[in-house]
Image (spheres, rainbow, N blue to C red):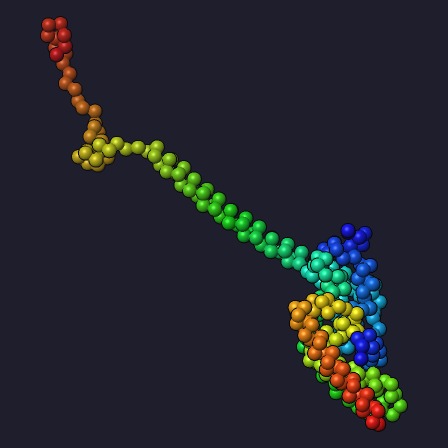
Amino acid sequence: MREHDALEHNPQVSRKALEALHSQLFGWALSRCGFDQATAEDLMQQAYVEVLSGRARFDNKSTLKTFVFGVVQNLARSRFRRLAVHMRLIKTYANAPVDEVTNDGHEDHQEQRRIWQAVESLPRRQRDITELVFCRDMTIEAASAVMGVSLGSGRVHYDRAKKALAGALAGMQTNETLT
Amino acid sequence: MSDKNTQEKLQKALAAVHAETPPAFAEVWAAAERQNETSRKRYAGFVAVAAAIVVGVTAFGLWSANEVEMTDEFLIADALMNSTQWSAPSDLLMPEYRFDIYQDIPLLMESTELQEGSLL
């Protein structure tokens, strides 16, 4: 059914529905460009342009969330890839001395950082499916669609990621117990 | 470790490491609409220029084709005008081409003498 604020070139999409997904989508866009705020905002804008112009067309074959996450993923892959790698490198080197400074008091923050580093150290697809399933509340099927891989392939990535993460997190707990 | 537990841990870690403060939807949406409108106008301009070029080329093509036809018509008319000056094919048989053999009026013999009531 066409909603009253449905988009001209994307009649199955309404502005209201996109607004409801805005925060989640921004989180995903951030992750796609090395957590750089400005680049993520630009990526979001581009994604909305794609939807507005009808170049990315939603046909109700998946949920709207899967669709827009896919749009962001494809845009990031095609246009922001080089920039994302660049941003990630900057973050890597910029964050190195910060770790040492924060070692003093923020134990909890350090633990969170280590947990997230365990996620970031996973191979790209395993990292993506971990983030989509665990942090963005998606099913493996939807996450696979966003990533552009088959469901079977998605399941394999998910399974491997879970095992690797379990190992990494268990290792962290052992280290904490020892110290 | 259960999936629920992992999920909680990862969500907490992500929130702690990377604060996600999304910009206002209305702002991003308005910017996207402006960009879409600009690119739409640019595209429309490009299409208009392309259409103008196509129309121009077609018009020129038609005009030049018409020009050729008019020249042909003119040539036909010119040929018709020329055809009003007609010369008989047998003129070629004359002693001198296009020379009138009867340049002078021939002299007729005249007589005032009568013979049996008639002039000789």
Image coordinates for residue B109, horizontal then vertical, percent? 14, 18
Q: Residue visible at 83% across and 83% down?
A: A112
Is residue B112 at least partly visible in the picture?
A: yes
Q: Residue visible at 84% across and 87% down?
A: A110
Image coordinates for residue B51, horizontal then vertical, percent? 60, 53
Image position of A150 with respect to B73: above or below: below
Q: Nearer the viewer, residue A68 or A75?
A: A68
Residue furthest to the bottom: A179
Residue furthest to the right: A105
Res B45 quadrant in image: bottom right
Res A154 quadrant in image: bottom right
Image position of B98 with respect to B49: above or below: above
Q: Nearer the viewer, residue A96 or B8?
A: B8
Image position of A52 with respect to B101: above or below: below
Report the quarter where the C terminus of chain B lies: top left
Residue furthest to the top: B117
Report the quarter where the N terminus of chain B lies: bottom right
Query: Horizontal placement of A35 versus B55: left or right?
Result: right
Q: Residue visible at 58% across and 54% down?
A: B53
Image coordinates for residue B2, horizontal then vertical, percent? 80, 77
Image coordinates for residue A171, horizontal then vertical, percent? 77, 88
Res A116 quadrant in image: bottom right
Q: Nearer the viewer, residue A101 or A127?
A: A127
